[in-house]
């Protein structure tokens, strides 16, 4: 580009990595000053570049794009461009780098090391008056003790490519004598302390997925045991950008390095508990400090940790929690960072580092609403199921219909299965009105022949099933005392709730395993967890399905097939209509129940259960006698309905609940009574 018409009375800025997270915020500070801003971009048409220009559209005339690449000599700029920049009184900011700890080693060396070398050469060639290098506390490696701003060669173990390349790139800058340089070492950069904005998942954000998983599966009050861990030096991006901008424009600091860090960093356990409290997840009530563990125990633990079986187990666990294996070296991070130069440079300024407690909720909320890959939104749902084949049983009404309707606009191929063809066609018509792809298959799931025919058609016409939702079921509310001569009650519930689901699983599981992907979602019941009286036939059939699912999920864990059990609380569907009491107790609507199925599709957890359900299971495990007494009280408080005992008389369970009954059903919402 031509610079002939640009006048410069002040410093101007050349910035690499301007479209990155830190770069975007630093540009805002530089635009607040006088002068022009020149940024290096690989592709001016890239979304990141367009977003940056749109973000600062009011001052877009001051932002000038140079097409190039840090991996090229002189950044890919020609001699004419470098010559024109010589008269521009340039302050050169080098922010471009690979910050992904999982990135390929060759790429990290090309960008972080050779890219820094090329940036320095181009800064010299364009006559820049100063080179500002965005380094990282990673250069210290796994150093134990206080690491000074003047230290580099003393670094601890550099056990991965990210630590190595950031270390080597800073060494290149420190060895430069042709141009004044300043080096900035930020801690783990988190989102903006006022807005929570962040565009990448690393550092403390690696913990968020695990925290959400625990929140969704474990009651908030349940105490957990964890590790104390080392100190995580977390700083918000606005503090880093403010500090870099301030120090870069102060005289007398050339040749110095600055730790943009928290002088009082929190330990890993404290950070986890802080975000867990923010997310309303269970916290670690007891945290083990590994520094205080007996050396002999440590040695045994390290030996176990090196075994292939343990490594495979840990790799699987970390994968489920979305935590890179490379981060394990930082659990006991022991480096502290002296920031004498930074404190001196910031003296008298209004720049203040907020404590993590002040903005943790803001960070969590932004991540949960914008970056959580398993957040419950149409965008994530559509990404998960577009062009996938989803088979839903019991789809003519209730939960099955509500789920199908929520999937109508997702781009999935929806197969509706039930016995009532007319009802299925009605649901299908509603889905087609919304633009969905839907197909109906009338099938009796208790018939081996019917299910075999269905499987043959589905595999032939659609290539198999990607997501199987076993929703069809039967419920019987009758005490065992009234069931002595009703073995068929148990047989009928087992036939549809267990064997019906099993027929479909065994039919479509081979195709899922062969493709290396697929999901089976089984609708179970909260009654399995609570042991609800009067539901022995229903609970036994669902418990059988739960047990099968648990075994299958273990066998197929390495085959790409996911199994999810939903211990569904009470839902207001035609299945519970015979029990009039349920007209007066808290229940989910079919649409709310369908939300749990959408959650299962997006997040693919092993189990979804309410906190009351989990509490009921834990109570039985910890205090079985108390649990039995509580359920027995409910058994006597809620007698059989007239429909269950075959009489015509008005039953207490068919009338409005008493005050005592209301208290119990509201205390233990969602449990079958």
Image (spheres, helix red, strand yellow):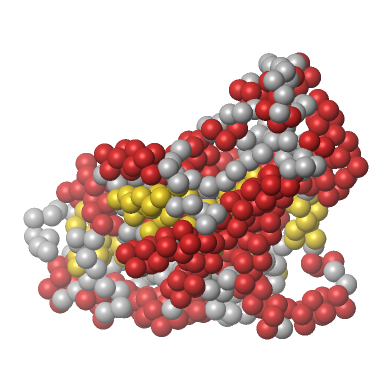
In the image, 572 versus 379, the foreground residue is 572
Q: Quadrant of the C terminus?
A: top right
Residue 260, horizontal then vertical, whole percent: 53, 57
Of 216 and 634, nearer the camera is 634
Placement of 547 over or under 348, stated as above or below: below
Left/right placement of residue 566 relative to residue 46 reads right
Q: Quick one: quadrant of the N terminus?
A: bottom left
Give how far across and how far down residue 589 sits, in percent: 52, 32
Q: Is residue 124 left or right of residue 66?
A: right
Closest to the observer: 645 or 284?
A: 645
Q: How many marks?
A: 0
Which quadrant of the view contains residue 546?
bottom right
Left or right side of 598 for 659: right
Identity of the residue drawn at 22% across and 71% down = 68
> Where does the image place residue 624, in percent across and percent down from the top left?
88, 45
The quarter holding residue 515 reads bottom left
At a point 30% along the width and 78% down the height, the residue shown is 71
């Amino acid at each position: 580009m031509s610079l002939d018409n640009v006048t410069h009375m002040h410093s101007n800025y050349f910035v690499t990595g301007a479209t990155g997270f830190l770069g975007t915020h630093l540009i805002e500070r530089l635009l607040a000053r006088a002068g022009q801003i020149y940024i290096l971009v690989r592709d001016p048409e890239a979304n990141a570049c367009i977003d940056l220009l749109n973000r600062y559209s009011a001052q877009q005339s001051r932002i000038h794009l140079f097409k190039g690449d840090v991996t090229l000599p002189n950044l890919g700029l020609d001699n004419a461009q470098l010559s024109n920049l010589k008269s521009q009184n340039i302050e050169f900011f080098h922010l471009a780098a690979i910050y992904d700890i999982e990135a390929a080693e060759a790429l990290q060396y090309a960008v972080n090391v050779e890219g820094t070398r090329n940036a320095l050469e181009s800064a010299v060639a364009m006559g820049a008056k100063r080179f500002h290098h965005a380094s990282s506390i990673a250069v210290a490696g796994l150093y134990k003790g206080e690491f000074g701003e003047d230290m580099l060669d003393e670094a601890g173990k550099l056990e991965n490519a990210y630590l190595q390349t950031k270390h080597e790139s800073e060494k290149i800058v420190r060895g430069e004598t042709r141009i004044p340089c300043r080096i900035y070492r930020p801690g783990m950069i988190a989102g903006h302390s006022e807005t929570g904005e962040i565009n990448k998942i690393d550092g403390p954000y690696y913990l968020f997925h695990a925290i959400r998983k625990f929140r969704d599966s474990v009651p908030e009050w349940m105490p957990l045991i964890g590790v104390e861990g080392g100190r995580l030096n977390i700083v918000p991006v606005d503090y880093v950008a403010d500090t870099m901008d301030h120090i870069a424009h102060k005289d007398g600091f050339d040749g110095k390095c600055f730790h943009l860090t928290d002088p009082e960093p929190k330990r890993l356990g404290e950070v986890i508990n802080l975000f867990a409290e923010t997310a309303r997840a269970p916290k670690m009530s007891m945290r083990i400090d590994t520094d205080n563990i007996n050396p002999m125990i440590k040695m045994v633990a390290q030996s176990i940790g090196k075994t292939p079986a343990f490594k495979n187990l840990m790799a699987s666990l970390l994968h489920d929690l979305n935590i890179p294996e490379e981060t394990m070296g930082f659990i006991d991070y022991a480096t502290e960072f002296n920031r004498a130069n930074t404190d001196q440079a910031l003296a008298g300024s209004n720049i203040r580092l907020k404590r993590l407690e002040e903005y943790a909720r803001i960070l969590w909320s932004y991540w949960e609403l914008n970056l959580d890959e398993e957040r419950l939104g149409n965008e994530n749902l559509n990404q998960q199921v577009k062009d996938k084949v989803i088979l839903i049983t019991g789809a003519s009404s209730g939960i099955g219909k509500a789920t199908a309707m929520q999937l109508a606009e997702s781009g999935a191929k929806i197969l509706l299965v039930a016995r009532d063809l007319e009802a299925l066609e009605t649901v299908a018509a509603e889905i087609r009105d919304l633009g969905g792809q839907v197909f109906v298959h009338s099938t009796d799931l208790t018939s081996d022949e019917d299910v075999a025919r269905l499987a043959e058609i589905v595999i032939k016409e659609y290539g198999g099933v990607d997501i199987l939702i076993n929703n069809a079921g039967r419920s019987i509310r009758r005490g065992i005392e009234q069931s002595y001569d009703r073995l068929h009650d148990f047989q009928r519930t087992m036939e549809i709730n267990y064997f019906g689901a099993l027929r479909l699983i065994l039919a479509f599981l081979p195709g899922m395993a062969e493709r290396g992907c697929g999901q089976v979602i089984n609708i179970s019941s909260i009654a399995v967890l609570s042991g609800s009286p009067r539901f022995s036939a229903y609970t036994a059939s669902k418990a059988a399905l739960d047990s099968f699912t648990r075994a299958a999920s273990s066998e197929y864990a390495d085959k790409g097939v996911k199994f999810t059990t939903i211990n569904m609380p009470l839902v207001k569907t035609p299945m519970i209509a015979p029990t009039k009491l349920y007209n007066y107790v808290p229940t989910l609507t079919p649409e709310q129940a369908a939300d749990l199925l959408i959650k299962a599709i997006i997040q693919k957890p092993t189990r979804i259960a309410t906190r009351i359900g989990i509490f009921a299971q834990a109570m039985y495990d910890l205090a079985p006698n108390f649990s039995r007494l509580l359920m027995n009280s409910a058994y006597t408080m809620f007698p059989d309905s007239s429909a269950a005992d075959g009489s015509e008389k008005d039953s207490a369970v068919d009338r409005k609940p008493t005050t005592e009954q209301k208290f119990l059903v509201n205390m233990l919402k969602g449990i079958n009574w």
